[in-house]
Amino acid sequence: MQTRERNLHRVVSSLVVLGVTGTLTACGGGSTSSGVVVQSDKARITAPVLAAGDLAQLASDNNHFAVDLYQAVRAPAGNLIFSPESISIALAMTYAGAAGTTATQMASALHFSLAPARLHPAFDALDLALTSPGSGAGTFQLSLANALWAQQGFTLQPTFLDLLAENYGAGVHLVDFESATESARLSINQWVSEKTAGKIPDLLMQGVLDPSTRLVLTNAVYFKADWVTSFDKDSPDGTFNAPSGPVTVPMMRGPENVALWTGNGYSAASLPYVGGTTSMVLIVPDAGTFDTFEAGLTADTLAAITAAPDATQGALSMPRFKFTRSFGLRDVLMQLGMTDAFAPELADFSGIDGQRDLLISDVIHQADIAVDEKGTEAAAATAVVIRTQAVVSNNLFIDRPFLFLIRDDATSSILFMGRVSDPSQ
């Protein structure tokens, strides 16, 4: 118990440790299904004060990032889904600890135009706006959850923890990446699975974390809602013209009061969900133009399309669909200009631990969606993996043929040289 108390105290002396039974002493230990959880004594701000227009500006900035990201990940061909909101939130929490050129590049790549003092309260307000109206009630549910996973004994800046507690409701789960890497990975995956109703059970694959990992920031989004008007469950199969040729798929017919509109090179529809706060917008480029339309999509053209000019009511038929996509976003984010965050000697996350010893090793994202006659269920999760820049010794297990040398170190002269193909011979 004394060792764990010392580790908790090293994380930050002003933390309050929370367990399943409530608040414990500042240096005590509370355990949940995800291990010991510590959190700043600052409460979540449930009524953030924003400057006029900040919430709309953040939503617009996030949408610009969403389209940039879509353009970056749309290849290869095939079904695609991701949650820009989840990725933006996870990286915004990481941005809270960035400084110097690292912070400047992150703000540019993520389209963060608000100053940090306004950005994080705006994220808080956006989260509350998304999840408050009717969330978790009846046939509509939209939830967002944030958490940090830190190496036991790793010192975090109190200001960093306070900001995440106040604006993102994020506590810190203490794990042991150094000597129990696999256990830490499973704990993170278990938390993500719980927050996504089991839809994202294995966000982090083996090998993503290693003993040099110091911090993982996670976000999980879960959405489940019924259509205001359900589709006909007895709809016959139909033909869908896939890029590889026509295929027969289960189709959904109706309803007949869907908002429909057309524009330059596309047709569109909007399907509202129960609760009146969310909808699915469908954009169908004219036949034979999908690739060109997709390549030319920008945040501004998307905003113009979703404004739904001159919408009329009509009937809609569409296929049922269900699929999952996973991404490692490291290369994508570097392509968007966020390079220093991943670079040894250049990354500056001194706002996290007060040192220049951290960098992002990867950003992992997974999203899942199922659409049927009744409604939609979708889930997504993002993990930002941060490790120390210090070199960690590796192990070598030789289980295949190898070469060997016996040499004189002073002169580099090779005395013997050979190969072992089968040591049993």
Image (cartoon, grey):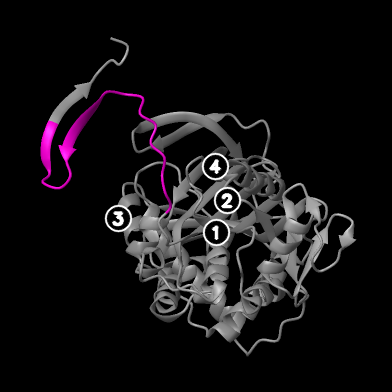
Label 3 vs label 2, nearer the camera: 2
User: Where residue 214 is drawn, which disc sits there?
Assistant: 1
Q: Position of residue 424 (x, y in %)?
A: 32, 11
Label 2 vs label 4, nearer the camera: 2
Instruction: Note whether residue 296 is visible.
Output: yes
State which tag comes first along the sequence, 3 or 2: 2
The N terminus lies in quadrant: bottom right
Q: Secondary structure at mark 4?
A: strand
Which is nearer the eye, 216 or 178? 178
Q: Secondary structure at mark 1?
A: strand
Real-space Cα separation, disc 2 to disc 4, in angstroms: 46 Å
Label 3 vs label 1, nearer the camera: 1
Give the class, few, some or many, for how many residues have Cα within 10 Å of label 3's Cα (few <14, many ≥20).
Answer: few
Real-space Cα separation, disc 3 to disc 1, in angstroms: 43 Å
Q: Which residues are magenta?
A: 392-415
Q: Residue at x 73, y 57 (%)?
A: 3
Q: Secondary structure at mark 2?
A: loop
Real-space Cα separation, disc 4 to disc 3, in angstroms: 22 Å
Q: Residue at x 39, y 67 (%)?
A: 298
Residue lying at the far bottom in this picture: please name it.
51
Tell me: residue 327, above or below residue 161.
above
Give the class, few, some or many, for how many residues have Cα within 10 Å of label 2's Cα (few <14, many ≥20).
Answer: many
Assess whether residue 363 is covered by the magenta stretch: no
Assess whether residue 403 is covered by the magenta stretch: yes
Q: Name the residue tied to disc 2.
A: 177
Q: Amino acid at mark 1?
A: Arg
Q: Secondary structure at mark 3?
A: helix
Q: Position of residue 425 (x, y in %)?
A: 28, 9
Give the class, few, some or many, for how many residues have Cα within 10 Å of label 4's Cα (few <14, many ≥20).
Answer: some
Q: Amino acid at mark 4?
A: Met
Label 4 vs label 3, nearer the camera: 3
User: Where residue 292 is drawn, which disc sits there?
Assistant: 3
